[in-house]
Image: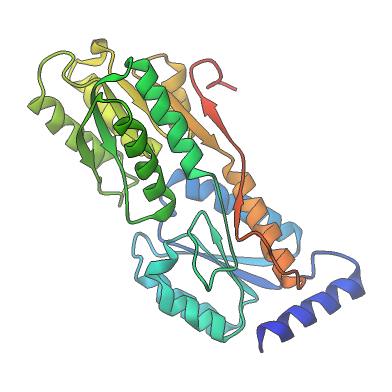
Amino acid sequence: MTMGTRIAAAGAVALGMGTAGALAQEVAVITPYLAQPGTQFYVDGFTAEGEERGWTVNVIDTAGDVGAVISRIEDVVTQGVDAIVINVDPAQVGAGLATAADAGIPVVGMDAGSHPDVAANVTSNGYAMAAETAVYVANRIDGEGAVVMFTFDPFPPVQVRGVIADAVFANFPDIEVIDRITPDVSDGGIADSRAQMEALLAANPEPGSISAVWAAWDQPALGALQAIEAAGREGEGIVITGIDANPQARDAIAAGGNFEASVAQDFEGIGATTAETVARLLAGEELRQRVIYVPTELVTAANAAE
């Protein structure tokens, strides 16, 4: 069935029934990152919205194996799903996306990235989030000191955060980025980030030798916090920021320690908006906006408990 046939059929059913619930029968959500709390939340948001629309939502976790996403896309194309949602760098799964395009099955990114075969990507504005936390760090350390960065370039939504933080810190001549760490994220990133931060603390033993830790998401920030506390260096005033504001991060921020700020993404909102985007495509709408941003909020000790 071609995409035009699918969309026409979906639209005819919707008009006949007068509801959005009949726009699709089965939607596959494919991700290698279900171990990440944020991914779990927006998959939950998508599933809840999809089930309200009467869809069967099939969530497929490849458990960190990005390459396996290609074969899973090919599998669900063979099964004849109505739409596919991916949470992975589209550039790394192009062969699978081509298979979906050939079958006329629309693909939507849920905090993924842009690609010719991805109809739209629903996400938070990573540029804005990174600027907000990097500027927070720069202001808190009065524009001078040694900063450690935790980044993850293989995933586009996180990669852009590192680019913007680099630019912010480069604009402060007295800030020096002393290390740019890409942690192992197979378990979410906390354990390896802690180990790498422990090594960095050991290499920089003098109080004040590390002014701040900027993390592109919360797990490395939490790992760094554990390392700082285990080393007995929490009294040095090392400022830590993350992005996501997951529950564990909120608790740490509310405690008033070194972890001072994060940015709350509306994960369930991303999921629900992704479902709405899928429904629009299946109804035959031509999307003019291929990147759809869902609003975020800076979280500090002042509002962490909200």
Residue in view at x 56 percent, y 19 percent: 303
Q: Where is 252 relative to 276, above or below?
A: above
Work out whether residue 9 or residue 36 is closer to the camera in this orientation and state it.
9
Residue in view at x 35 percent, y 22 percent: 138
| Corner quadrant of residue 257 | top left
Q: Where is 139 relative to 213, above or below?
A: above
Q: From where the camera sits, is residue 222 visible?
A: no
Q: Where is 300 relative to 9, above or below?
A: above
Residue 247 x/y as whole percent: 49, 32
Q: Where is 226 relative to 75, above or below?
A: above
Q: From where the camera sits, is residue 226 visible?
A: yes
Residue 28 x/y as whole percent: 57, 69
Work out whether residue 211 or residue 187 is closer to the camera in this orientation and state it.
211
Residue that protrudes farthest toward the bottom in the picture = 1
Residue in view at x 48 percent, y 59 percent: 113
Horizontally, residue 20 falls left or right of residue 127, namely: right
Horizontally, residue 185 falls left or right of residue 293, namely: left
Quarter of the figure that contains the N terminus: bottom right
Residue 263 x/y as whole percent: 49, 32
Horizontally, residue 65 falls left or right of residue 195, namely: right
Quarter of the figure that contains the C terminus: top right
Residue in view at x 75 percent, y 57 percent: 52
Residue 230 x/y as whole percent: 20, 22
| Corner quadrant of residue 210 | top left
